[in-house]
Image (spheres, rainbow, N blue to C red):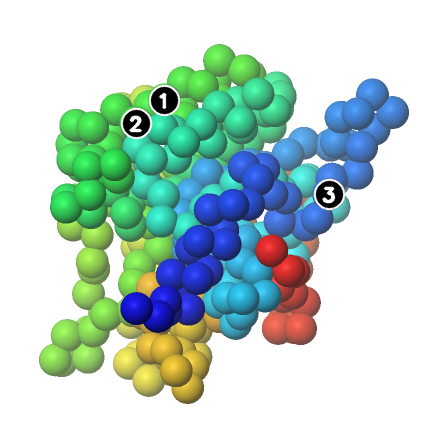
Amino acid sequence: MSLTRRQITTAALAAVPLAVAATGPAVASPQGRPRGRTLYIAGDSTAAQKYAVAAPETGWGMALPFFLHERLNVANHAVNGRSSKSFIDEGRLDAILEAIRPGDLLLIQFGHNDSKSADPTRYTEPWTTYQDYLRQYIDGARARGARPVLATSVERRKFNADGNAVGTHGDYPAAMRALAEADDVALLDIQALTIALWQELGVEETKKYFNWTATEQDNTHFNPPGAIAVARLVVGELLRRRVLAPRDVRRLDDLIPESWITWPEA
């Protein structure tokens, strides 16, 4: 049986080292420490670094550095297909916690794959195990003097018969909102922001933001315009929630050329 491009991409990414910086290798200080603070991303395929085999598919984490000051490094650990559970079980959170330092940020976005009830390696229940796994990220970051930030999952492109954008993540966004309030964690409600954006753009215009090609109609993953749009929302919320200061942010109102997105070889 021949493999689809999605399967090939997933297999390739599974072999990639745990730590992949979205902006390339960080600039090291004389002590071997990256200069400035680092924003770590723990998440799934919607945020992940993509490689040449997957182009034009683009994770929003790839566009995040365009809106951040150069002194704020981005370490994108998001990986295709991971849930809050499988990311931990594979040792990926441990890899972040070994590197993270006081003053750094840990941005946590899971939910797409936590709902895979047929897959016990990924499935979590919104109001119990999902919150339990998310707390491991929160507690791990805080124990190391870093700041955890929760982000609800970006919304898929789905419209009802009346042309209204509809949610696809069930109780997971609500469970994350409740956890953020209970544990006093900054929350970026990207699910609410993206569904509002898709509603504003409409059925046809949203196709320009997702990975729609001649051979694939993907309503989950982004192309360069979509990744840039979502990264802009993420940084705007980091600023609004005072996780970042105005001096940490740049180009929020600027047009970002699609050509800035590149896909390295895996």
**In the current view of this chain or complex, which residue is farthest to the left?**
161
Q: Secondary structure at mark 3?
A: loop
Location of residue 37 in the rendering, given as x and y in whole percent from the top left corner: 67, 31
Image marks 2 and 3: residues in contact by CB distance under 8 Å: no
On screen, residue 255 above or below 113:
below
The residue drawn where x is 42% and y is 69% is 5
The residue drawn where x is 87% and y is 25% is 30
- Residue 244 in sight from this viewpoint: no
Residue, disc 3: 25
The residue drawn where x is 39% and y is 82% is 215
Q: At label 2, which amino acid type do we have?
A: Tyr
Residues 54 and 173: in front is: 54
Locate the N terminus by quadrant.
Answer: bottom left
Q: Around disc 1, counting alpha carbons within 10 Å, would you say few (fewer than 14), some (14 to 19), or many (20 or more)?
A: some
* Numbered tag placed on residue 133 in the rendering: 2
Residue, disc 1: 136
Location of residue 18 in the rendering, given as x and y in whole percent from the top left corner: 54, 37
